[in-house]
Amino acid sequence: MSEKKDQSLVTVLIALLANLGVGIAKLVAGLLSGSGALLSEAAHSMGDTSTQVLLLTAVRRSQKPADRQYPFGYGKDRYFWSLLAAMGILVSGAAFSVYEGVRTIVEGGEQTAYVWVNYLVLGIALVLEGSSLFQATRQVKNEAAEHRRSVPGQLEGSDDPAPRAVLMEDSAAVVGIVLAGGGVALHQLTGQAIWDGIASILIGVLLAVVAVLLAGTSRRLLLGRQADGRMIRAIEQRLEQQPEVDDVVDLLTMMTGTDRVLLCARVDFVNTYSAGDVEQACMRIDDELRKEFPDLDEIFIQPVPRSDQDLRDRVLRRYGHVFADE
């Protein structure tokens, strides 16, 4: 788990340094050349920089150990700060880019003799953003291989929003560089600033889409998304293999942070076992589950009768089936 956190930290740091350097260069180029698209890209990079700062905060704060006030730990702090990062992209990047694009179209603009600086800066930005994108892609691929998922499946099911955020931001940055380059080139070829403005608006729309997607990911995790379905099925199978367990009635899981899963198992124990036997079984099962599933953080095993109709109805409404009937 610490190795994964270190990898996320490296990914975010690389993205932060790349975005900061690129943002300053784009700002200088935009001011020298008068390009609205370059100014939009500067806002894009600066927005990404602030996003990386928030993601670094998320990684650091989520590692705080559990205490009396937060007995399940601070893992969800990562999701909260990631949500703020998504909103930062929407406000600082998307809104400014659309505004700059509309202003350029309405007011027009003349390119200066320093238009060549745009191409130089965009080329450098493409290399730096590409390096950051490579690191984020490599982390996502490694995690996908570790969890035996496809890359899209890993992006959808991951409990760590940092690599997903960096990957999507850097992908948007590369597309934004291409859009900005196209806007600058068409402005230079036609003498019409409208192309610069259109490029800025497209960059803003792109950033808005990225922000909404990232915010949706953080929202699902903050709401308490269940653990990976394969893990749930494997846990159910292990529980049913225990000699003391007659049947699994209900399984509740929730992501409480990156690589942290809360498990509540409601099981029907064999009636011939005494209360002391059930206690010993719970302790043994807890230990075995933790060894097989390292992501399990807190485990609660509750003895219940599988004939409890109210409980069966709740499980049926939640999952569409009753575990004990499978």
Image (tube, grey):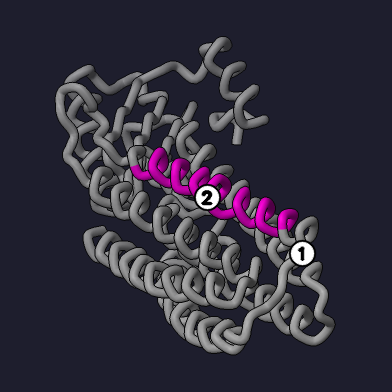
Label placed on residue 108: 1
Q: Residue at x 82, y 74 (%)?
A: 192
Lateral position of residue 230 relative to residue 112, left or right: left
Q: Earlier in the sequence, mark 2 or mark 1?
A: 2
Which quadrant holds residue 285? Answer: top left
Q: Where residue 228 sits in the image (x, y, percent)? A: 49, 49
Q: Amino acid at mark 2?
A: Ser
Q: List x then y, in percent, for residue 23.
A: 45, 69
Task: Give the labeled residue for mark 2.
Answer: 92
Q: Nearer the viewer, residue 38 or 52?
A: 38
Label 2's element?
helix
- Of residue 67 and residue 172, the one placed in the foreground of this image is 172
Q: Position of residue 70 (x, y in %)?
A: 23, 27
| Residues in magenta, as a range | 78-103
326 lies left or right of 294:
right
Residue at the location (44% across, 64% down)?
147
Q: Is residue 19 magenta?
A: no
Question: Which kind of residue does numbered mark 1 sit on?
Answer: Gly
Q: Residues within 10 Å of mark 1 (few under 14, many from 20)?
A: some
Circle nearer the viewer, 2 or 1: 1
